[in-house]
Every structure is written in C-alpha cells, then in structure tokens.
C-alpha cells in the first residue's frame, strides 16, 4: 500500500469540500437557491439542470475565482445575465443571507460574470489545513466512490536493458498513478511482459552462440549485455533442455530474460518506480484466462471460423476488419493474450483498466476495447493512453534505440548523466501524448538552471530560513489571524491555498503539467515574498511568528508538489 493511502485523511474545509474552489462553488449554489426562494429568480438548482462552475480568472485583479453561472442560466430562466448575476451576488459576501464565511466580495462584471474574492479567514483556513496535516495536504477525496484502478505500464519485453526509448512509459505511468492516488483513487501498478514469445528464444540463441564462440544468429540480439549473459549463464539453466526434448535456446532464453527482468526492476527502482504486480503472458495461458475469454466471446456469438482460423467479429463494433484469435495452425495470437488479460484483470475486482502504450500500438486500441465490450465488460472502463514519441538527441545526432543492434542508451545511463529529478521534471512538464525532443547534452549543461532546480532552491531557501528562526528562538504562530492580510503575505497565501485544486485538476485530467506549472508559480511567489517581507525579525516576534507559519505552509506545499512528481525536496543546495 502506498504512503498516500496510509497517510492521515485529506483535510477538508467547511462550506463544501477539500478545496476553496469547491467551497466557493457550494456558496454560489446556495446564493442561487436563496435568490430562487426569495422570488428574485424563477428557478433553483433543484429545478434547473445547470452546473455551477467556478474557475480562476485570467487576471488576479478580478478576484480569486469567477463564475459564468448567470450567463448559463439566462436561457432557462428567461432573464438577462446581469439581472441573474446581481441577484446571486447580492446574496453572497459579508452580511448576506448565504451564511458563507469564505467570500469577502462578489461583484458583477461584463455581461454577467461574478468575480469572487476570499476572506482572509478563508485563506487562513487553507494555510491551517496545510500545517495541521502536512503529509496529506493537497490530497483530495474522489468525486464519488473511489475506483480501484489497474494501471499497466512500461511492459517492455525482457530481451535487453530498459532503454530511454521505452522508458517514456515508466515516467507517464508512475506520474499517472501518483496523481490518481492523490485524487482519492485506489491504484495497482502492473508490469506485463512476454515470457514465451519468439523474442525470448532469439535471446537464448544469441546467448548460446556467444557462449559457444559462434556468430550470433541474424535475428538475434547483440550488445555487451548479451556477452555478459553468455559468460554468466550457469549449466543448470540449460538442464531443462537436457532432460527433455526442448530446444536449448528456450531454456537459455527463459534464464536470460529473467536476469534482464530483474535488471529492469532495479533500473525502475532507481527511478523511483515500483510495481505491485508482475504478470507474464505465459501465465494467462497456463491459468486458463485466454481460454475463458474465448469462451465468453463464443458464448456471446462474436466468434466464427474461416480458413481454419478462429476470428473475432470486430467489425460489428466499428473496427475496419475482423481479428484473428487462433491461427489456422492452432497457435493463439497476441490478441488472444490481450483478451485473456482483460478478463483476468476484471476478475480481480478492478473498476477501471488503464494501459500506457507507445504510439505504435494505436491499431490495437479499438480491437481490445471492442472485445472487452463483446465479452460483457464496460467498454468505457478499458482505457488506453498512447505516449508520444521521444527523440533522444546527443550532440545534434539522434540516439539509436535498437536492442538487437546493441546501440542504445539505457535508462540507467540517462539517470546517471542528468539525475532522477531532472528527468522526472522533464517528462512531468509535458503531456504524455506529446512528441518531444530530449537533448541529453543540453539537459546536462543546463541542469543548474532548469525549472526543477529553481523550485528545489526555493524549498532549500525556506528550510534555511526556518533553521535561522529556530536559532534565534522564533517559532511559527499558532494563531494565524492576520497572516493572510493584503501585501506580500496575502499574495503568497493565495498561491499556497490553491494546491488542492491543482491536485484535483491533475487527477481529473490524468496529467501532471499543471503540477509543474504550479510548483514554478509557487516558487516565484515565495521568492517575491522573501524579497519584500522580512521573516526572521527578533524585534517583531508577532509578525515573525505569522510569517514563519506562512513560510512553513509554503515549504509543506512545495515538498508535497515535488513529492507528487517523485522529485526530492532538499533542505540545502
């Protein structure tokens, strides 16, 4: 179980949820309903099906949040948007009948937007939540019942070390799992690999060839790692072949692939990626899951025989052609394994399956989802995320990613050059489906100036400030009254309390670019605050105490944002 699942429950604010945005949304809805009950508006949220949305305005000068509810209500209520907006705004803010202690002001702008500004007490409440439960600050509850989600990613065949080419899935999958957990989902991380295909035999044949001093077969694998395996393979690894009629290449291949799989697991561990389940293709056949899937399709009438092969009628579900499940020679296709895998996963009680695949798997998406529907599963519960291409460049030349040719850069080599934190930030700041160029040398040369260093430096600077405060006997105030007043203090507080919204949005979008953007914004806000406000001042312990509390809430937030991305938050640099 992950740390996110064992930490204290996510803190909540009053008036409607774990974020100030959700609380503001509830306050707007209450004001709308009050206007309806007062007769100022002809319909309430109970009678008019219009969602209440709030969002950050383009300029902070307009307020903390804004809603376009009045514009959306104009048609169903038959009133001008500004009339609706004024009726709602009049029932918000101090002295209004809505009862909200969060909204300082609600003003109507333009054709009918309502701009909202939080009270100092609301900001102090958000800061208090960060200080009261730092380990879970930013985590939010799921919108409904927490789903149990299976995320299968990386899944590179164990025929060579994990390269920086197929490591894209490691970053995308791990980041996705992290934001889903922070958004209240239960997540199982899974790695699926082929342990019985022709590639495994080819690997074994390559190892045996080098062990016996022969040329590697034309369809074999090259590279130093194959030679290392050839020198290391023990005689007992070939014993199964000696005791049966099995081809020795299969025995050698299974042994070699397990050594490589263990190496892949170690490489991913260096990156901070760990899996709950390692699943093999062979087990799906051995445990009968492939046959169960075929029987489900047969029972639903979606299989037919033609030319000696067994076909899935995928065209019935919009595919461009039907798909072979069992070849005419009786051998199951890889698609058959996909069917068994879907069946096996749902048998474990998952509500949602997410596959992180490379862009070259585009043609497989429709057939697998179609087959899931044909087998009686919810098609919407089977989701594929296709990662964009990554072109790794060194000195202006694209780096080859061929395992067979042995000319590739491993994930371990990349991490040793640029570091785990820089690599994670690079991928976290880009959408998983984006095609990107990664200049290895440029990343090395600019590592001291890159955004992750900028954010980490802000955390280290805060840690230094807090150490200095302790040295002079100053501590964070327990009463946060006045900590969020206007000026540099209030500007920083407004950024800090946004963090749960950022997590909520990241979980909903299943992306992390918003988190890196927010972390950069928060670091910038802190540096501006530190420039304009004196934190450690023995001559003014009251103000210092409040600012130390604000700085500590900022530190917690930066650490949690970096931690969400799997990036370290150093106390010194």
Image (cartoon, helix red, strand yellow):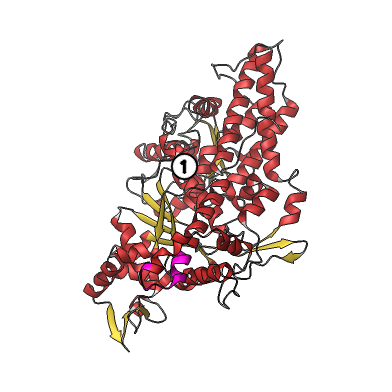
The residue under label 1 is: 182
- Residue at 49% across / 30% down in the picture? 102
Task: State whether residue 543 is above or below residue 427.
Answer: above
Give whichever of 499, 73 is nearer the camera. Answer: 499
Instruction: Give coordinates of residue 478: x percent, y percent.
Output: 54, 16
Give the farthest residue toward the left.
299
Q: Quadrant of the N terminus?
A: top left
Residue in the picture at 70% in, 29% down? 461
Q: Which residue is at the front of the view, 249 or 479?
A: 249
Quick check: 306 above or below 204?
below
Q: Residue at x 55, y 38 (%)?
A: 499
x and y percentages locating residue 535 in the rendered image: 69, 21
Magenta residues, start to end:
243-254
165 displayed left or right of 192 = right
- Image coordinates of residue 151 in percent, x first then y, are 43, 54
Crowding at dot 1, Cα within 10 Å, few <14 / some 14-19 / many 20+, comes out as many
Query: Quarter-wise, where is residue 466 in the image?
Result: top right
Residue 61 visible in this rendered orientation of the protein: no
């Amino acid at each position: 179980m992950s740390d996110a699942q064992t930490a204290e429950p996510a803190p909540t604010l009053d008036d409607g949820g774990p974020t100030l945005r959700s609380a503001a949304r509830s306050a707007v809805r209450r004001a709308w309903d009050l206007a309806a009950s007062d007769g100022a508006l002809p319909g309430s949220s109970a009678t008019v099906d219009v969602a209440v949305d709030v969002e950050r305005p383009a300029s902070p000068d307009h307020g903390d949040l804004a809603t376009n509810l009045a514009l959306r209500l104009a048609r169903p209520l038959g009133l001008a948007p500004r009339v609706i907006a004024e009726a709602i705004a009049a029932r918000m803010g101090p002295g209004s009948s809505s009862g909200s202690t969060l909204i300082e002001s609600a003003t109507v702008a333009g054709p009918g937007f309502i701009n909202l500004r939080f009270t100092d007490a609301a900001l102090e409440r958000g800061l208090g939540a960060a200080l009261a439960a730092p380990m879970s600050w930013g985590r939010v509850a799921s919108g409904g019942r927490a789903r149990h989600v299976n995320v299968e990613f990386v899944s590179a065949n164990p025929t060579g070390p994990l390269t920086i080419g197929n490591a894209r899935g490691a970053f995308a999958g791990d980041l996705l799992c992290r934001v889903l957990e922070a958004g209240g989902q239960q997540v199982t991380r899974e790695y699926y690999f082929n342990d019985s295909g022709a590639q495994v035999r080819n690997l074994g044949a390559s190892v045996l060839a080098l062990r016996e001093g022969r040329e590697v077969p034309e369809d074999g694998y090259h590279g130093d790692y194959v030679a290392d395996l050839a020198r290391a393979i023990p005689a007992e690894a070939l014993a199964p072949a000696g005791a049966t009629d099995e081809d020795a290449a299969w025995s050698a291949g299974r042994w070699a692939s397990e050594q490589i799989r263990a190496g892949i697991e170690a490489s991913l561990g260096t990156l901070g990626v760990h899996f709950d389940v390692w699943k093999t293709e062979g087990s799906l056949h051995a445990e009968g899951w492939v046959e169960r899937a075929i029987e489900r399709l047969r029972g639903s009438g979606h299989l037919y025989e033609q030319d000696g092969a067994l076909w899935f009628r995928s065209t019935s579900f919009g595919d461009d052609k039907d798909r072979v499940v069992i070849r005419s020679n009786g051998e199951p296709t890889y698609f058959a394994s996909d069917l068994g895998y879907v069946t096996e996963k749902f048998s474990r009680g998952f509500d949602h399956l997410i596959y992180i695949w490379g862009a070259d798997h585009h043609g497989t998406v429709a057939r697998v989802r179609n087959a899931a529907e044909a087998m009686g599963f919810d098609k919407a519960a089977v989701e594929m995320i296709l990662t964009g291409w990554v072109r790794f460049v060194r000195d202006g030349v694209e780096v080859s990613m061929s395992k067979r040719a042995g000319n590739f850069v491993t994930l371990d080599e990349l991490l040793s050059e640029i570091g785990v934190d820089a690599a994670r930030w690079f991928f976290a700041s880009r959408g998983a489906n984006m095609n990107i160029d990664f200049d290895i040398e440029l990343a090395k040369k600019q590592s001291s100036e890159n955004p992750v260093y900028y954010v980490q430096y802000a955390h280290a600077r805060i840690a230094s400030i807090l150490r200095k405060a302790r040295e002079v006997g100053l501590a964070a105030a327990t009463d946060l009254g006045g900590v969020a007043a206007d000026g540099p203090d209030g500007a920083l507080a407004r950024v800090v309390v946004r963090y749960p919204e950022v997590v909520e949005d990241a979980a909903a979008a299943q992306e992390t670019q918003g988190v890196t953007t927010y972390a950069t914004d928060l670091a910038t806000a802190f540096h501006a605050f530190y420039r304009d406000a004196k934190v450690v001042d023995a001559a003014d312990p009251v103000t210092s105490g409040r600012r130390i509390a604000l700085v500590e809430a900022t530190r917690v937030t930066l650490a949690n944002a970096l931690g969400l991305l799997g990036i370290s938050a150093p106390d010194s640099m």
